[in-house]
Image (cartoon, rainbow, N blue to C red):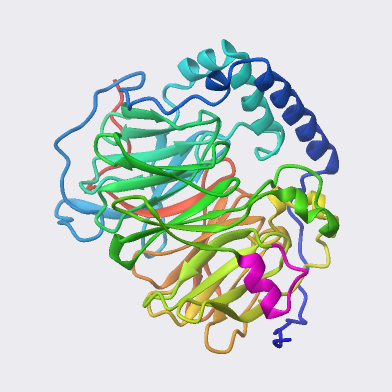
Amino acid sequence: MPTATPAHRTVSHRPAPRRRRSAALAGCAALALTAMAATAVTPAAAAPAPAPADTGSAGSARSTQTGSAQTGSTDGLREVLFVGNNWDGTADVLAATGDHARIGRLDVVPDRKQRLREIHLNPVRLAFFLGIRATVGEGHDQYVDDMYSTPDGSAVVVSRPSFADVVSIDLATGEINWRFPVSGFRADHMAVSPDGGRVAVSASTSNTVHVLDIVTGKEVGSFTTGDKPHENVFTDGGRYLWNMSIGEVNNVLDAPWLDWTKGDRRITVVDARTFGQVRVVDMRERLDAFGRKDLSDAVRPVVFTPDESRLYFQVSFFNGFLEYDMAADRITRLKELPKNPDTDEDRTTWVNDSRHHGMSMNPEGTRLCVAGTMDDYATVVDRATLREGPLVPVAKPYWATVSGDGKHCVVSESGSDKVTAIDFATGRKVVSVPVGDHPQRVRLGHVPAGWTGPSVG
């Protein structure tokens, strides 16, 4: 069996609040209610097909935006970090470099009353809405999962899980440009194409990924995935689109012998132009060949090396990550990271089956940054040796990204409502910045130079 690289140091500090078994059991009850409600209606009503993009509650569709988020002109724009505050429905906008000071805040649910009214008038949608609150939402509604700015920096596109949609919000006015309801009942992770023109969103209850024109909100294609599509990543300059499906993560059937109940977990790779399936990667086969039949095959956050020759990925329930050789089609290394002795070893208390959730890599491809979610730390790992640096205490870190200048790993502290920057070179904390309630995804983007928030009135 290949040799693992366990870490023996432990970390101990104030643990973040934990999701208790009672919440999980309540979630199961809510999902049972959902299932009963779904059987009481026609199939079409239970899983509506995506509607064309509309203009939401205010504003109108924008059709004059051009350029590229990555390669187009950024004249008159400022690079920033968008931080999605999932439980209060806001996005904080921070400086992309330096002290990461807060620049402004955006309401990403300006149509909240309208959406809630629609949900409460539809028993099936209400059942799913309450199910999301009781399970993946940990007792809260989920208002923002992911977000990307448009190429010209005039709008931000947001996936909203509890509202099962994607919206474009005008950064100048705070109004909705367009709204796209996803198929099924929950919207999840997104990805933006390298040219900035398209955004892919996982519809987690319909096993579908929708790809939208980022300016108009029109669907340009879609494809089928495994159960519970999660992260999306464009590769090869936008030629391919990868989706990782994680299976069922919202119940208490977490014992290893119940792994078979988790569903179809796989990586689906499609041609990003035709959306035809190019490849399916079943990590179960690769994990077994590597000698780790004990690990889950639910692939969580991932990161590619700059040349896309290696894929690093986390899996459910594991405190660490694995390395996958793209050309050889096999797992080559494993890194086990320290366990926090204060972490409850009852797997049903780990949020959505994630012991660790969040990875990023510096632009040179020499260092990884890992969010040790339930172990309450983040750490920088040398990619050559897989040796971890200092364990930086952070409260339930849920995501890791890279600052605009590539010097910092920026993690969201969902347990303390902060984002914290860690120096890739030293592995040590640089600064923490207060943000809104339960920050999750953090993404680089652009706003107009001088922007401090939408105009009022």
Q: Residue at the location (66% across, 56% down)?
A: 395
- Dividing the picture into quadrants, the one containing residue 454 is top left
- For the C terminus, give its image quadrant: top left
In the figure, 201 relative to 36: above or below? below
**Who is closer to the viewer here, 13 or 398?**
398
Q: Residue at the location (24% across, 56% down)?
A: 195
Residue 214 visible (yes or no): yes
In the figure, 234 relative to 90: above or below? below
Q: Which residues are magenta?
A: 283-296
Residue 444 horizontal/vertical position (percent) = 37, 56
Residue 336 visible (yes or no): no
368 left or right of 275 in image: right
Residue 144 horizontal/vertical position (percent) = 50, 38
Residue 134 horizontal/vertical position (percent) = 71, 32
Q: Residue at the location (61% across, 66% down)?
A: 283
In the figure, 250 relative to 301: above or below? above
Q: Residue at the location (66% across, 55% down)?
A: 396
Residue 118 horizontal/vertical position (percent) = 51, 14
